[in-house]
Amino acid sequence: MTETIDISFAPFNKKAKVRAGITIADAAAAHNVPIRSDCGKHGICGKCRVVVDDPAGVSPVGGTEAKMLSERELADSLRLACQTRITGPVTITVPDDATLNGDVDGKPTLLGAFCINPAVQRFYVPTDRIRQADQGRGLSLSDRIVEQVQKTDKERIHFRSRYSLEAASRVDMRLPYVTVVHHDEQGVISVVKGSVESSLGVAFDVGTTTLAAYMCDLVSGEILTSRAMINPQRRFGLDVISRIASVIEDEADLEKRLLERNLLDRYRSSGVPEEPVLDKMKHQVITAMDDLAGQCLKEAGREREEIHEITVAGNTTMQHIMAGFNPKSIGVSPYLPVTRSPVLMDCVEIGLDLSPATPVYMFPMVSGFLGGDILAACLADESYKRKDTTLIIDIGTNGELLLINENGIWGTSCATGPAFEGAQISCGMRASAGAVNRVYMVPESAGRIEFETISNADPVGICGSGIIDALAAMRKAGIIRENGTFDPDKPGVVRDEKGLGKAFYLPGTKIHITLNDIRQVQLAKAALFVGIESLLEQAGVETVSRTLLTGAFGTGFNQDSARSIGMLPDVICRTGIDTTPNLAGAGAVMALLDKSKRTDIQRVFQNVHTLDLNQVPDFVSKLSTATKFPANHGEK
């Protein structure tokens, strides 16, 4: 029998029984204790530092922890949750900076008028006509409803789902009317008592970092309310590659354990799910979407039964996980999605707690790393209707690029990684209260570096826009050289035992930027720079008329800072760059309110010419060159 151990998590006042030998991170995940895991529990980010009250209750310090934690931290009983295994009773304290907070700074808003042509219609059927319709022909209840709608509204409808038939079976014939809710493709999705005057829909933007929901009135086209939250899958890693790796590693570990016990064949034939991590990821995102829908309904004073359609735009991995598709084919060459076509499912299939037959439309996907979100952004801007050249840049944990003009559409993705969102940075954090989000040099103070924080709160870390600003200001002040190393003689630079600069501290704080932090940003900005230049070259485009930056990070950083560190090519900066927040969300709303937009985006995704950057001649050489910072004026 497996040994279980009693543990406690503070400050959550949560007690639990866990299996001996499980890591603190896995124990926390199993009991909904929010601990950060930016690197996907690989022991390389150091963000899951927790305090243990008794070293005897956990495994000895390993090599990874010895490398990541200082002697002082180890003496203060700090451990890495992803590396430390539970061996005895222990109380684990999760510090604030290691807590996975679900809050989002601000909430998504969308403005503007939207065309209304929904896929959902409502038909009012008098119950007396249903009762009198048979005339000896042996028609069923559903047959009579279909016939009455055709007679009254001249529309052909059909019952497809057993859940819609179940709804019809509950019709109360004592009421004067029933309302039949019908979807163009899915057929009757509900039969509701009485006369229902409204239909609602929810458009979801499912990002790697953030989930956003927009609740719309399908009759008026109005966006009634919107909500956002952090994607709870972050505990499996900040980027899609980490999450795919979690699924693959879990499968391999599961098979290994079962083989050791000679149970694999029996397990496979038993019908027990073989991908528990995948199931957990799906459950987390679906539960979060349910919560967002519930918040929107509560604010608007509406009921779940009024939601008659869902649209979803997300990157390829997020859409796969949400639909229950294993994303492992995206993580290995040739990086293929299971399907590129739009997916239409019912809420009951996907697990959303809404009326079972409510349709869920998921955007098509261009490739393994060009998903429905960039297509939704293109739809929102309607770039495909313009003659001039538009470049859409969606920067997140993955950079997605789409170039559109009258001659064609080209797309690529670049591995920017999560550094731009504050991850894999020693003092990195999300853009929330206390994050350093603006850094600048004050020439009048002999090159002094100053900064601001979100909400003017006490500084606790630095977010993506802050790290871009910081490197630009440090370059301007000469603190960082062209190759990314420190000038050890500059104020604020800390030297190592050899006298070389190893970190820079923002004045008056413990927030520091290390050589590794600089390297992470160099790799990310080089990937974006080379991706843009390669895409323009493939398309034979020398001038870009308009560039749109979108995504939470893409609209938050200082473009001048980005240009000065060599993140954005001059060819797009010369004509100006517009920031357009929530383009993917806007596209999801448009597809929800106007079914013809789905036809538009179907044509777009089928005609995208994709570029694999790994196949670009001299790509590695170009990437290496782009990691350097542009020379400052007068710099040798």
Image (tube, grey):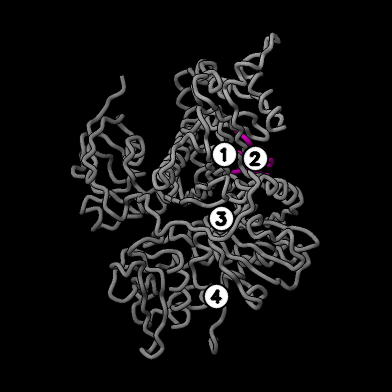
Q: Residues within 10 Å of mark 4 (few under 14, many from 20)?
A: many
Q: Does any portion of residue 455 appear in the rendered image? A: yes
State how many labels appear.
4
Determine whether label 2 and label 1 are within 8 Å by CB. Answer: yes
Query: Which of 382 and 394 lies nearest the eye of the viewer?
Result: 382
Q: Which residue is mark 2?
A: 119
Query: Which of 5 and 224 lies nearest the eye of the viewer?
Result: 224
Q: Quadrant of residue 45 in the image? A: bottom left
Q: Which residue is mark 1?
A: 309
Mark identifier at residue 629: 4
**Above or below: residue 239 compared with residue 561:** above
| 331 within the magenta span | yes
Residue type (three-letter) at the residue carrying disc 1: Glu
Q: Is residue 157 left or right of residue 24?
A: right
Q: Main secondary structure of the magenta part?
A: loop
Mark identifier at residue 226: none
**What are the residue bounds of the magenta stretch?**
327-345
Residue type (three-letter) at the residue carrying disc 2: Ala
Determine whether label 4 and label 2 are within 8 Å by CB. Answer: no
